Image (tube, rainbow, N blue to C red):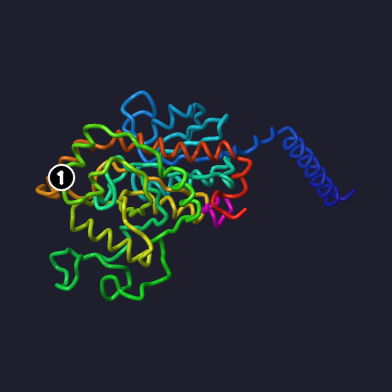
Amino acid sequence: MSPYVEVRLQIRLFISLLVVTLTGCAAQKPSQPAAIKPKVVIITMFERGADSGDAPGEFQFWNVRRDLTTVFPFGAHHDLHYNPDSGLLGVVTGIGTAKAAASIMALGMDPRFDLTQSYFLVAGISGFDPADASIGSAAWAEYLVDGDIGHEIDAREKPEDWRWGYIERYSQRPFQQPRRQDENGEVYRLNGALTEWAYQLTKEIRLPDDVDIAAARARYTEHPNAQRPPFVLRGDHIAASTFWHGEILNDWANAWVDYWTDGQGEFVSSAMEETGTMQSMTYLDRMGRVDKQRVLVLRTASNYTMPPPGVSAADNLLSENKGYSGLLAALESGYIVGSVVIDELLANWDRYQHTPPGTTQ
């Protein structure tokens, strides 16, 4: 036998042994567990300390009261918490659009979970426009408007005919008409039928009230809705990573939401995360990993977005840095209102698993 033929036979033998070895290893490899299919994902943004056992943030009531005792290590802001009996999964994204977007994208790409039929409930506190609602109230949003994407000059340098130094990108003047229709994250519209279903289900709920929030709302003598006991309403949301405050910026938020929703939206709540969350939801929906038509946003009022008469914006903002008078009331309202929707989804999962509520069946 020639050396050439012998080498070829040795190579073939080696390849055959390698194939057999690799096949045997593959056969012995344990199968991957089936992906978990949460029915509802509760999205909160912050905790003040631990996930249980201390002063609560947005997540703690859900974690403790819903027995989310199965913990999955998660390389984002907090670990994930799950109740395998009910199918509830809880996530804490971290504060701000960037953390929210990163956390939701990480969750959506996590191979441990199949989220294609999951509902997502964003439940968090926020500032409310006193023209629309009171401390402790809860608002279901259909429109989510970004307050960071734009062009800005210092208001001291703005032209005299500009109300604010902040304008839309690529425009020649503030609130230019017709507005651009090629939005790139400036506005997201949720499933209106699902939002309306959630509102109708919860609009008659009596929300908790106490002397502290009653005293806080009594100061808003020029805003009748701000003086009402807490209630459930529909109202849209602006998300901006800068915590803004004051009457002038409150007027800007109303105009900004009105502009980007073509007059269909009504600014009620202000926080920092929703457009980041929905940016990731939009991409994950395109990948077939979530259904963005199953997203709900519920914000509750821990504070107002402007001061009461006789108080400066700076003084009111600095006093709120010591703690919101409506924090606990807002946390309770979020849990109470959100729970009604979650319980309905879980109790009738055979109906809602394949078809979102409010959709013609």
Nearest the eye: 165 or 226: 226
Nearest the eye: 184 or 84: 84
Q: Can you say whether 235 is above or below 112 in the image?
A: below
Element class at badge 1: helix
Query: Which residue sits at x=26%, y=74%?
Result: 173
List x then y, in percent, for residue 280: 46, 52
Q: Which residues are magenta?
A: 284-293
List x then y, in percent, for residue 184: 41, 64
List x then y, in percent, for residue 19: 77, 42
Q: Which residue has dot 1 on it?
A: 316
Q: Is residue 290 magenta?
A: yes
Instruction: Give the crowd class for mark 1: few <14, some 14-19, many >=20 residues within 10 Å.
Output: some
Residue 38 shown left or right of residue 214 in the figure: right
Residue extending furthest left? 310
Residue 168 shown left or right of residue 351 in the figure: left
Q: Can you say whether 290 is above or below 157 in the image?
A: above
Residue 79 shown left or right of residue 319 in the figure: right
Query: Which residue sits at x=26%, y=49%?
Result: 225
Residue extending furthest top? 53
Three-letter amino acid code at the position of disc 1: Asn
